[in-house]
Amino acid sequence: MIESSSEEPLPVRVVSESIGEYIGRLGPVWVEGEVAEITRRPGSQMAFIRLKDTSVDMSLQVTCHRSILEAIDPLPENARIVAYAKVNWYAVRGTLSLMAREIRQVGLGELLARLEQLKNLLAAEGLFSSERKRELPFLPRKIGLICGRASAAEKDVVENVERRWPGMSFEIREVAVQGSTAVVEVSRALRELEQIEDVDVIIITRGGGSFEDLLPFSDESLIRLVASLSTPVVSAIGHEQDAPLLDLVADLRASTPTDAAKRVVPSLSEESERTSQLVQRLENRMRAIIDLESSKIIALVSRPVIKDPLTLIDLRRDEVKLLKIGSHKAMTALLKESRSEIKEIKAQVNALSPLATLKRGYAVVQKRGRVLLDAKEVTPTEPLHVTLAKGEITVEVISKRREKGK
């Protein structure tokens, strides 16, 4: 650490040289980025490349010998390269650059392999899961649209939405949809639209293009941003055969910009027709219910009991009469049967009664309430109670005798 103070400040030269010494310790590194600009100065053996990071607004100056660049010429627009370079600090101007010793273009096969690897990683994290996808509103208050500047895709979406639902409001962000700044600009537009309260759905769209042109829509930072939004996102990138990773993370994938317009708003004419059909069905149903209830009322009114309420009373009166007659007959028969039973029981009781014996001339003699069975139980002059067939008498014993052999 270099010592310094406000009283003893360091010269710019010392600070710049110290920075160069510190950076020099880094040594050569492999760096990857997208070629944003190539400069070849006439008469110079050096070439200059501005290498940009596609995920953020950041770039580095790469310097190399013309022969290194010519070895991979011609480079397509927005080509991705990896460079083996040493970090240099130009102390005089206070600028940093990379001196490339080797440059390789990232081939299509390698890009596809990286893309597949990223796809598997994001899928494993659940970013493409159907459970996390949000449902689009039936009729959004306002549509957020991210598209290229004055692009045909923007025109397709706006015209088709207007055709289906006239007067729909848009919040449009025109951005770069390919190249080194695409990811940064699309991400910025997404964050802006997410903050607008009445934007209920966001469409990201552009026309078709090469695999390299659509690479920004497979950028990891952009995919993670879309997954984090609360507003539903519709991806309408390229054509049916194009499949950037944005299609997988979006809440809805539309095959074309026109298809996106059809998916985010209903057709006013179709909804009007559907509403008319529902109203007609409701009217028919209500009419059927009213007709059914009317027929029930007519059937009830036509019944005799409704025409003459006394009819019901007359019917009940007749029923009561019949029940009364039946109960009288039943009671009479029951009493008659009971009388016969009582008569038979009475005859049986009379047959078993002591009175029948008394009527044949016998009597019952009692001594102090106890029936006498033996003459020896009494004494002369003792009063006894005698029960006859008719009446009772009290007698006095004059004498007694027992039968012989008793």
Image: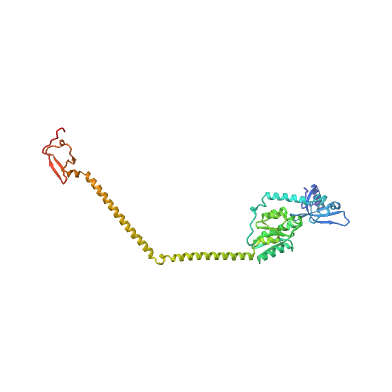
Residue at the far right in the pictured view: 43
- The residue lying toward the viewer, choosing from 144 and 160, is 160
Q: Is residue 224 left or right of residue 279?
A: right
Residue at (71, 63) in percent of width and height? 156
Along the line of sight, the residue nearer the viewer: 50 or 241: 241
Position of 119 with respect to 38 (left or right) is: left
Q: Indicate whether 92 appears above or below 400.
A: below
Residue 271 lies, with reference to residue 75, above or below; the image says below
**Residue at image location 66% in from the left, 65% down from the top:** 164
Residue extending furthest toward the left: 398
Residue that sits furthest to the top in the current view: 405
Q: Residue at x 23, y 45 (%)?
A: 349
Q: Which of the 4 quarters of the picture holds residue 332?
A: bottom left
Q: Position of residue 376 (x, y in %)?
A: 15, 35
**Residue 211 occupies quadrant:** bottom right
Q: In front: 63, or 283?
A: 283
Residue 196 seen? no
Q: Quadrant of residue 386?
A: top left
Residue 216 screen position, x and y as percent: 74, 55
The tally of labels here is 0
Q: In what quadrant of the picture does the C terminus appear?
A: top left
* Color scheme of the displayed model: rainbow
Residue drawn at (67%, 66%) of the image: 163
Left or right, 111 with respect to 44, comes to left
Residue 3 image position (x, y, % from top left): 77, 49
Q: Is residue 293 visible?
A: yes
Q: Position of residue 294 (x, y in %)?
A: 48, 66
